[in-house]
Structures are given as C-alpha cells and as structure tokens.
Amino acid sequence: MKCGPALRALACALAAASFALLTACGGGGSDGAPPAAPSTAPGAAQNVQPLVVDAGPIGASGSPTGGVNTAYISVTVCQPGSTAQCRTVDHVEVDTGSSGLRLLASALPPALALALPAVNDANANPLAECAQFVIGYTWGSVKQADIHIAGETAAAVPVQVIGDSALPATPASCSNGLAPQATVDALGANGVLGISVFKQDCGQACAAQAIVGTYYSCPGGACQPTAVGVSYQVANPVAAFAADNNGSILALPAIGASGAASASGSLVFGIGTQSNNGLGAAHVLTLDAASGTFTTAFNGQSYPYSYIDSGSNGLFFPDPGIAQCSSAVAPGFYCPASTLSLSAANTGPSGGGSTVAFSVANAEALLDANPGFTAFDDLAGTSDASTGLLYGFAWGLPFFYGRAVYTAIEGMLAAGTQGPYVAY
Amino acid sequence: MKQHLHRRLVPLGLLVLLGLLLAASLPAYAVLGAAPTLLQPSAARSKSTLAVVPRAQFSVQEQQLASGTVVREFVAPDNKVFAVAWQGPFMPDLQAWLGSYFPDYATAAAARRSHAGRRPLALQKSELVVHAGGRMRAFHGEAYLPAQLPPGVTPADIR
C-alpha cells in the first residue's frame, strides 16, 4: 500500500534499516524442508507465527516496497507430500480481508513452481484465476501446494501463482482498468496470505456459474470465465489446517501516536483450541454470512458493509467534516488541523456490539515528521460516497495495534460460537 | 422433401443462435454520459432484475447483475446517465459501465502504486469523480460526472 511519492522517498531512506529487519525474518527465502515445530504440549501443534510491520521486501530498484501499515509473515510452501521441494517465502502480506495464499511466481524457485501440480477444470484444462482487489488485480495459475506455517500444515491446497509465465495474457475482463500486481514492486510483498472468515476466495457463487473477473479456463490460449467447484478454488489455508483450523488471531502491540519504525506481532492459529488462543473477554461480532460484514454506526450514519481488514493500511470511512490532504503525499487520506479523537459503534447482525475509540492524525504531517516509520495507528482516509447505496467503514491495520483480533471461519465452531465472526 | 426440410433446419438454428448473440451484444450496460441500460426481455438478462424509481429531477434504475452485484444508474431528464453506483460481491465490469470515461479512471488507478494492501480509490477531477472501495465479497463504489448533474442536483442528492 502506497500513499504517494513521499512514501517512496521514505522507503528509500529506509533501505538500510529494513535490510536488517529482512535478514532477521528470513531474507529472500530459503530452500529446504519446512521448519521443525518447537517442542510443545503433546498432541498440540505449535500454532504461533511471528509477524512484522516493516518496509517490506526489496524491489527491483533496491528499495523496500511495502509502504506503511503492512503486516508480513513467512510461509513455507512445498510440493504436495514433499519435504525436500520446498521454499520459505518471507514478506507475505497477512490479509484478513481475502482468502487464499497467492505467491509471486518470481518468489518461487523455477523447479518448485514446475513441481506444483496444476488444478484443472472439468475439461482437464489448467485453471487460471483473477483476484480483483479495489485498486489492483492478481492474475495467475491455480496450483496445489502444501502450506506450512508455524507447526501447522495445510496439505495439497489450491494456491494462486501470480504472474505464471505459462499463462496467456490477462483477459481485459480481469484487469478491469486496475493495475497488475505481478511484481514485488507492484504488490509490495512476495505474496498475500488471505485468512478471512471465508473458506475459499469465491465460494458457491463461482461454483454455480462462471463469473467474470474470477476463474478462467484457457484452452488454446484464449481465456474464458468458467465455473469452479469450491474444492478447486484457492482456499483459506487456516481452514485447511489439520488442527487449529477454526480461525486465527492477529495481535500487534500498541504504538505511540507518532508511529513506530516497525512493529512485531504474532499470528496465532485456532480459537479456543489451545491454552494460548482462548477468546477471553473479547467482544464477538457475528457477521453477515454472505459478505462477511457488520454494521458500524458513525457520525449518525449506519454503514452495514463494514469490515476489519489487515490488508487495508488505514481506517477508511466517509466524513465530509474532516479535511482531506491537499498534496500528492497522501491523496485520499485525512489531514485534520490537529489529531481528532473519534468513536464508532460496531454491531453484528445478531448483536454483540462495542464502541471503538480511534484517532485521526494529519497524515501528511505524520509521515513528514516521522520518516522511516512504517507503523501508524492513527492513519485514516476517506471512502466518501454520496450515492444511496450503503457502504462500509473499513477498519484497516491501525485498528490492530494494541489488540488481538480474532477471525473465526464460516461454518466452524470457535470457542463456543459459530463462525463467521470477528472478535477483539 | 424431408431431406430438404432437414437441411433447412440447420441455417434456421444458426439464425436463432445469431439472434441470441445479437441480443447478447446489445449495450447491456449503461455507459456513463450516455443512454441508460436498455430494458431487455428477462431471457436475455437471466438472473438480473431491473427497477426504475422516478425522482423529481432524475430517475434511478437499479439492477442486480448475475454476479449478485447491484448497480444503480442515475439518469438525467435528457436520458443520459450522470452517475453509476455499485455494491456487491464482485466488481462490475468498469470498462463497460464507465464507457469513454474509463481511461481516466484506469490512469488514476494505475498512477497509484497499488498493493494488495488496499485502500479505497478516490479520483476527483472536474469532469469525473470515482470512489471505489471494499474487499473480496463486499465491493462498493460510485462514479459521477459533476458537470452533468441536472440543474439543482448536488452529489448529496444522488441517493
């Protein structure tokens, strides 16, 4: 996620510092077997993986690519069943707003990429997938891989290999005018680990019919949208774990109002499955089963398509009363004269609400005054909309600082409550 | 004779197919700045619904696409679409909906260094305003032409 040229300069300034961080969390990845799980209670998998908010992986220009407020983790992928044909990929973005593991082809050794079996459609043609995000898309092949994170394993799970050179060019219906996210520079990561409340990225909708901008079949080099059964769709790895598969907890430490150079947190798998992942006193917000959203009340307005999303790098909501930044430094972000203390109330379809206090700082001033910082809990911007459709309040990564945020997967019982829900 | 009839059936079948293809290639969508979506027989727009709501200074057409996403078109008295808005599980085909304004949008989208970490898009130009947000399974957005709002209509009236 980028806020503009100033952040690029900031990223350059950060190169030296982040190199140390990169080295600390694995550098450019490593070949070989998945890491052995540390010893733990008998029968319990090691279920904690460290994560970091930092400047991101180094891009083609030699500068970090991540911008601000992006949480990264290391993920090991293997040829199904193999402990030798593997790669640990660092700086994979943790995204509670999407489902499925997506890795840049360039982040995988060619031999491993070739060894991952293709997932085929009903006519034995390899499946391709388009994943549309708000401002960019990923286009890649669907492959099967074993995924190892901490001590957990998801076996033979469909993943997306972004920018697989074996695929035909991106269909126009996929790009939709958006920017391709097929390089480290464009993605700001080596991949995306989608661990939302959904088990697949698309689900029943794509199984029932071909939907433009999702799955494609490309016989003879011409790609057409195609329907794909849910078991062939790119899948949420957490739901595919053998254990601790009912959800996850993303926890980040509290940071000061002027941000931090980096932040180290953890991703814990399972909810109420082990001694370290109980729900405790967290507020549970049940979600709309179709959209995974809840209602946020803010400023006298109700936003029924609201969501908590580690993949958004700010808090995004409409408020015409807050000045937007004027320069190209942080377009779309808020630049109030002084930091605002605000609150909003979240309510799930079956109740369980809570009021959340948050701060909105002047984004330009914050970034200018803290060059080299990548973690901010008071960065917010507009999702202004004047039309009558009802929109959402996006609780991005700033929401996660100082919290443990639970994401319970659809159809799973997690600490006594049926998913999908979020809790914090 | 029988054989002759049989042979004629093939081109007839092709004609039917051609007709279906033609129906499918009609402008199924509104184009921003142009005429609104044509009301078409339900067979040609399976699983989509269309509703027209007249307002004082403009009308609103709402339809649910086959993908489940709802799109509203805001139509001025001169029968031109001055705004479109969407909400639903999938992004609509913006090239179709934005029409000649699509390149502006695409340029703005591409100009941002876009990452999987996402934030809403806010394009604010004198001729075109686009807001797009959401995430997988819950997208929303709007695009409107400030210079083509009917007299007396402000963006806040677009609802």
Image (tube, rainbow, N blue to C red):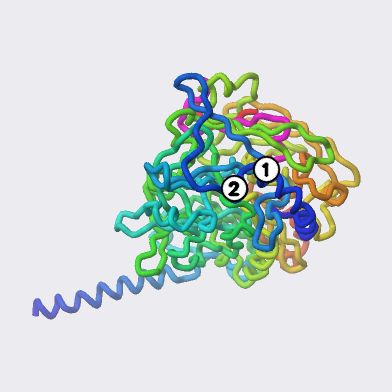
Q: Is residue B111 left or right of residue B49?
A: right
Question: In the image, which residues are magenta?
Answer: A397-415
**Residue at far right of view:** A337
Residue plotted at (54% across, 62% down): B93
Establish if B72 lies above or below A32: below
Q: Residue at x 57, y 55 (%)?
A: B71
Q: Residue at x 66, y 55 (%)?
A: A58
Can residue A211 be seen at all in this image of the molecule?
no
Asked if the residues shown at circle 1 and circle 2 are in contact, with their CB atoms under 8 angstroms apart, the answer is yes
Q: Quadrant of the N terminus of chain B?
A: bottom left
Residue type at tag 1? Ala
Tell me if A26 is positioned left or right of A228 in this view. right
Left or right: A68, with A136 as reference point: right
What crowding class fits label 2: few (fewer than 14 Cα within 10 Å), some (14-19), or many (20 or more)? many
Give the vertical position of A47 relative to A27 (above or below): above
In this view, the residue in front, A169 or A55, is: A55
Q: Chain of mark 2?
A: B
Residue A285 in percent (x, y) is at 61, 29
Q: Position of residue A206 (x, y in %)?
A: 42, 50
Badge 2 amino acid? Arg
